[in-house]
Amino acid sequence: MTQVTQQLEEPDQHQPIDVGAPPAPRQFQIVPLRGLPVVGAVLVGLVVTIATNRLWAIDFFHVVGGGLWTALDLFLGFVLGPILGRLSIPARAEFTSRLMPKMVLIMPTLVICTLAAGWQLARHLGYLDASYSHHGWVVASFIVVAVMAVIALGMLEPANVAVLFELRKPEPNGEIIARLMRRFIFTAGITGAMQVAILVIMTRLATT
């Protein structure tokens, strides 16, 4: 009788145990709606600044936008990139699903503010005139910034969005996410290196 009771109480080791379905992918917004009012306010401020042509405000948007763009590119390319490369695919996917939606709003906003305010600042100070003594440096900065903008909006942002759409799938492909993230970090590193060239040009213009 005791043996029968023990057999009823002990689970059969040969029967499969239901451990539940695999966890569903984390739900998130590709474009964070909470950040849209902030982006809208920044862009409205930029438009008002350019329309009123106030030197301090134009310089503020250009310096702050350019500084944040530079810091972000350097951080993504040379600090965050090596860290992500050592993470496991699940950890990388979790981190990416939290970082990338914010980048969808941050990167275009910084690029627009830096370029628009920079152009207006150069026009206001007469740097666009061919007679300006350092006009060649200004042209060089325009070329470097144009390449950076193409990389940021033509390569970084599409890779960012592609990662987010892949993460939204019921079964995200870790290899695809890893490949897209490598492209994102690699191009961020390239723009980070080009930001150093911009810093050299800007400091040259400011001190001569």
Image: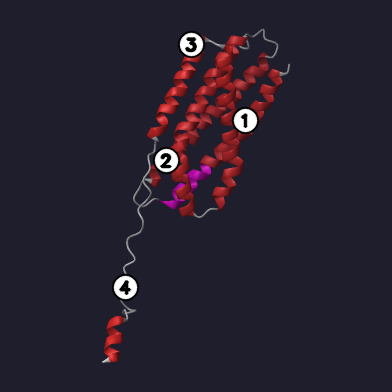
Label 3, residues with CA under 10 Å away: few <14, some 14-19, many ≥20:
few
Distance CA(mark 3)–CA(mark 1)? 28 Å
Residue under label 3? 51
Left or right, 12 with respect to 141, comes to left
Residue 174 sits inside the magenta stretch = yes
From the viewer's perspective, is 78 left or right of 48? Answer: right
> Which residue sits at x=53%, y=32%?
151
Question: Which numbered disc flags the more N-terminal residue, 3 or 4?
Answer: 4
Labels 2 and 4: the sequence-earlier one: 4
Write down the residue under mark 1.
195
| Marks 2 and 4 in Cβ contact (< 8 Å) | no
Identify the image quadrant of residue 28.
Answer: top left
Q: CA distance from mark 3 to mark 4?
A: 70 Å
Of badges 1 and 4, the one in the foreground is: 4
Residue 58 at what x, y percent from top left? 56, 16
Query: Which of marks 1 and 3 precedes in the sequence?
Result: 3
Q: Which mark is residue 162?
A: 2
Identified at 55% across, 24% down, the residue is 146
Cα separation, mark 2 vs mark 4, equals 38 Å
Task: Give the residue type at disc 2.
Answer: Ala
Q: Which residue is mark 4?
A: 16
The residue range painted magenta reads: 173-183
**Quadrant in which the N terminus is drawn:** bottom left
